[in-house]
């Protein structure tokens, strides 16, 4: 663990002067400025209860409390049990808070490498978002209910306002995204698979999901073409010709702040380790350098890329009509 002086030096970085820090500590712990000065200089050792209060107040992370060990990293992981939807609600609230905090920082950016359509773009499409949750619940918990029955359970938790807030916060952050040619493949396979399992009570559900997906791609194509979000924040879009392999999101401003690595359909782990951040930042830069910019000025290639995506969706959509 870091020494007491190292800890207070770390806290001091959050203030303009050490005098301000000592004053805050004195107020926080109901002691004098002189006592705070002695803690800072390590003249007096601080007791455990006061240390605990400091850690909680300043939201100090484990990697800030302990010396860096190159063999270990600290992660934030929110285990999800999709039979306990309150846990999912807390998870998605955490994502909303992460994006809100990022949106409040001048110059913040999202760097997203995506082998699946990033979650932000699903937020205006509740049916699609619910379907992804249903697939995850089915795969992880082996639920036996239909999609529509599971949606009724989801609707009890008032998730739509949180989805809307996530979409709104995303709009207020500059972003660069890298997709590959297979971003819709898993989702289309899942829709087809669950239809074959007769998990859709209504025959219209599959068409609703596919129509929403077509609308999502159409709106994203416009976003990529414009090169900026509705808020005026810059948006850069790249496509890598080979599969990306995995998805991750980096949030940065003047520094690299965090990286979230996708673990499954909806879950991820978040890390603030500088080593992991730099490794993934270099991976992102390497992917971007090997990718084609399909924003402003690449109309022919952009149209070809999005036509390929929509053709895949329409192929499954038309197959549904042929079966009917």
Image: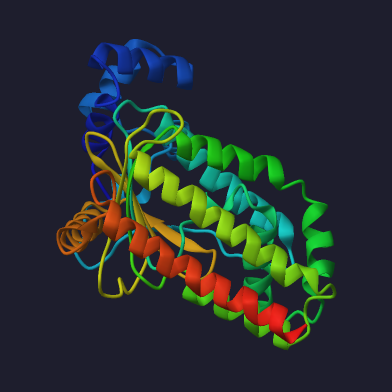
Residue closer to the observer: 53 or 37: 53
Q: Along the horizontal axis of the image, is 153 left or right of 209?
A: right
x 46%, y 36%: residue? 171
For this rendering, which residue is in front, 262 or 13?
262
User: Picture coordinates of residue 112 (x, y %)?
Assistant: 34, 54
Which residue occupies the foreground of this view, 318 or 140? 318
Q: Nearer the viewer, residue 202 or 46?
A: 202
> Would you place residue 187 above or below residue 251 in this image?
below
Question: Residue visible at 77% across and 80% down?
Answer: 199
Q: Tell me where residue 305 appears, x and y as whole percent.
A: 35, 64
Location of residue 315 by image quarter: bottom right
Q: What percent of the width, then of the height, locates residue 185?
A: 48, 75
Residue 136 in the image, given as x and y percentages of width and height: 62, 72
Image-quadrant location for residue 114: bottom left
Please say if 279 is above or below 156. below
Residue in the image at 64% along x and 61% along y? 211
Horizontal relation, residue 312 to residue 320: left or right: left
Residue 49 showing in the rendered view: no
Q: In screen coordinates, is 286 left or right of 208?
A: left
Q: Residue at x 39, y 20 (%)?
A: 25
Q: In the image, is 216 to the left or to the right of 32?
A: right
Placement of the C terminus among the 4 image quadrants: bottom right
Q: Say if residue 198 shows up in the picture.
A: yes
């Amino acid at each position: 663990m870091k020494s007491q002086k190292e800890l207070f030096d770390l806290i001091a970085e959050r203030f303009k002067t050490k005098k301000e820090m000592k004053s805050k500590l004195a107020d926080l712990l109901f002691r004098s400025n002189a006592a705070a000065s002695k803690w800072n200089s390590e003249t007096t050792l601080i007791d455990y209860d006061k240390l605990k209060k400091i850690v909680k107040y300043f939201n100090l992370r484990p990697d800030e409390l302990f010396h860096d060990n190159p063999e270990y990293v600290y992660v934030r992981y929110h285990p999800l049990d999709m039979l306990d939807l309150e846990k999912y609600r807390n998870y998605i609230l955490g994502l909303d808070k992460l994006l809100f905090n990022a949106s409040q920082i001048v110059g913040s950016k999202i760097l997203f490498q995506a082998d699946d359509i990033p979650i932000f773009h699903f937020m205006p499409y509740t049916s699609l978002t619910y379907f992804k949750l249903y697939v995850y619940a089915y795969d992880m918990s082996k639920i036996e209910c239909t999609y529509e029955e599971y949606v009724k359970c989801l609707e009890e938790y008032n998730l739509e306002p949180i989805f809307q807030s996530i979409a709104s916060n995303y709009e207020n952050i500059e972003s660069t995204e890298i997709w590959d040619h297979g971003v819709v493949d898993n989702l289309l396979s899942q829709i087809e698979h669950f239809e074959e399992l007769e998990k859709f009570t209504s025959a219209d559900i599959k068409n609703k999901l596919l129509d929403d997906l077509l609308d999502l791609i159409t709106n994203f194509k416009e976003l990529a073409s414009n090169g900026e979000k509705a808020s005026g924040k810059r948006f850069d879009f790249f496509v890598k010709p080979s599969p990306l392999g995995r998805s991750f999101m980096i949030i940065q401003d003047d520094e690299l702040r965090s990286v979230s690595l996708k673990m499954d359909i909806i879950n991820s782990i978040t890390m603030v380790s500088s080593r992991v951040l730099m490794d993934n930042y270099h991976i992102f830069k390497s992917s971007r350098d090997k990718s084609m910019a399909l924003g402003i000025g690449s109309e022919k290639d952009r149209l070809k890329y999005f036509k390929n995506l929509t053709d895949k969706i329409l192929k499954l959509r038309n197959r549904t009509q042929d079966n009917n």
